Image (tube, rainbow, N blue to C red):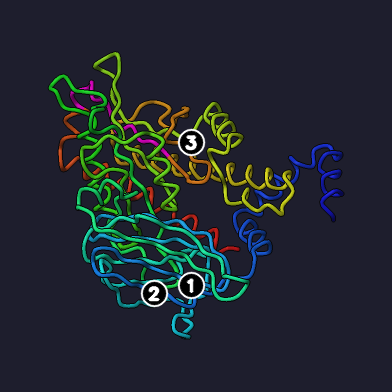
């Protein structure tokens, strides 16, 4: 069916859009991957990674046989790294075709590694011998139609503080590129508040920002101990981060799940218990508004060859699937809290238009662990033993969430 005919069909057939959304929802994410694969251009081939420099400045040149989009960012935890995310490519360095490999560095780069990152993306990691920033990055087309396409990255030495401030996220645990063809799910944990924003306070002077950070660090350690996940924190110290930046970090890192940790405040000291939030209908309207302004761009909306009606349908499906997955995870957390005996509010799973829940393509939930205005809750939240119990409950819910996803994929 041609574009014009498709437009007439979508506009003229009553209920077609609703029907198609329903069908696509049943088919699920696997069909989205199939549609994307059919529309995708031929896979580009990277034929060389060249590094030159004297320690004062280092240049990295990535050569390919086709133009490439890319996203570059820094990771500061464990070791200093520059990460370059690419569409799925074939690696043919020095004529050797492989799924993964590594090479020697020069200047501020001690070495580099590359591999497939997800089913649709590849990743190049530059391990640094000292902190450095990407001073310039750009793409070059071949001259006169011959030669190779190039991505160029100029790195300049920096202080550890400058590197940490520029790093897009705090990645902990296994390094993001290994010699494997698959990756672990990435969990992004967001400790609420921080820095100049203390959040709620107890009558004894304890701040929510400290409670949430302690819980986030404990949850990170618990998840890493399972060796099932990679984990990133939006903050690992007492710093202030804008709400929008928290969501942006999760999306840029390609998070598979986002969980924000908070501790509530109530008008009555007797109010006690945990609750878990997902996005409300009002929040969904905020996403729609952001998409109209191009503040939130989904992968399915990028392809210029697709009719706008089809882009809208696919984007709606992604957003609906994200909403459904968020609800499933929140229900698992609420159920786990109930079974563990942790104090909870009535109607534990609630909905609200919170900014950190607005990502249209990352399942997200916000856990209010208790009330800073309740003495019993504060005692529990500051007890290492009881905090461990809470963290174990959340980690179990994360396990159940991804176990469920694996079962669905295995059944297809």
Q: Position of residue 369 (x, y in %)?
A: 29, 33
- Vertical comparison of 1 with 150: above or below: above
| Residue 401 in sight here | no
Residue to which mark 2 is pinned: 50
User: Which residue is more in the foreground, 238 or 157?
Assistant: 157
User: Which residue is more in the foreground, 277 or 353?
Assistant: 353
- On the rendered image, what quadrant is the C terminus found in? bottom right
Question: Of callouts 2 and 3, which one flags the residue occurring earlier in the amino acid sequence?
Answer: 2
Q: Is residue 397 left or right of residue 392?
A: right
Verify CB contact (< 8 Å) between mark 2 and mark 1: yes
Q: Mark 2 or mark 3, which is nearer to you?
A: 2
Q: Position of residue 151 (x, y in %)?
A: 47, 65
Residue to which mark 3 is pinned: 358
Dot 2: element:
strand
Residue to which mark 1 is pinned: 63
Question: Of callouts 2 and 1, which one flags the residue occurring earlier in the amino acid sequence?
Answer: 2
Q: Which mark is residue 114?
A: none
The CA span between labels 2 and 1 is 8 Å
- The residue segment tinted magenta is 365-376
The CA span between labels 1 and 3 is 37 Å
Q: Residue at x 26, y 65 (%)?
A: 128
């Amino acid at each position: 069916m041609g574009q014009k005919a498709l437009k007439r069909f979508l506009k003229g057939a009553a209920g077609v859009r609703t029907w198609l959304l329903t069908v696509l929802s049943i088919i699920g994410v696997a069909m989205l991957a199939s549609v994307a694969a059919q529309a995708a251009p031929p896979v580009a081939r990277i034929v060389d990674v060249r590094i030159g420099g004297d320690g004062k400045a280092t240049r990295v040149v990535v050569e390919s046989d086709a133009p490439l989009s890319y996203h570059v960012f820094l990771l500061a935890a464990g070791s200093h790294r520059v990460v370059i995310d690419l569409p799925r490519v074939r690696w043919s360095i020095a004529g050797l075709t492989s799924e993964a490999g590594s090479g020697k560095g020069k200047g501020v780069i001690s070495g580099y590694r590359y591999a497939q990152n997800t089913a649709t993306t590849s990743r190049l990691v530059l391990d640094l011998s000292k902190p450095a920033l990407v001073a310039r990055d750009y793409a070059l087309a071949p001259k006169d139609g011959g030669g190779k396409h190039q991505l160029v990255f100029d790195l300049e030495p920096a202080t550890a503080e400058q590197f940490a401030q520029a790093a897009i996220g705090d990645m902990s645990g296994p390094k993001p590129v290994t010699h494997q063809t698959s990756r672990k799910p990435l969990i992004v944990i967001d400790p609420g508040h921080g820095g100049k924003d203390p959040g709620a306070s107890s009558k004894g002077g304890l701040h929510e920002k400290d409670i949430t950070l302690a819980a986030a660090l404990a949850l990170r350690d618990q998840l890493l101990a399972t060796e099932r996940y990679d984990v990133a924190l939006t903050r690992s110290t007492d710093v202030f981060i804008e709400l929008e930046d928290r969501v942006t970090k999760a999306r840029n890192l390609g998070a598979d799940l986002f969980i924000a940790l908070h501790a509530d405040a109530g008008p009555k000291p007797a109010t006690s218990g945990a609750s878990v939030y997902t996005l409300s209908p009002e929040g969904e309207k905020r996403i729609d508004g952001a998409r109209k302004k191009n503040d939130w761009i989904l992968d399915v909306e990028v392809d210029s060859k697709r009719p706008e009606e089809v882009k809208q349908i696919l984007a709606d499906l992604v957003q609906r699937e994200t909403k459904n997955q968020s609800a499933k995870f929140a229900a698992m957390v609420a159920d786990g809290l109930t079974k563990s005996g942790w104090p909870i509010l009535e109607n534990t799973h609630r909905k609200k238009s919170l900014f950190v829940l607005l990502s249209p393509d990352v399942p997200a939930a916000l856990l209010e662990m208790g009330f800073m205005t309740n003495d019993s809750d504060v005692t529990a939240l500051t007890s290492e033993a009881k905090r461990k119990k809470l963290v174990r409950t959340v980690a179990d819910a994360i396990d159940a969430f991804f176990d469920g996803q694996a079962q669905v994929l295995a059944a297809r």
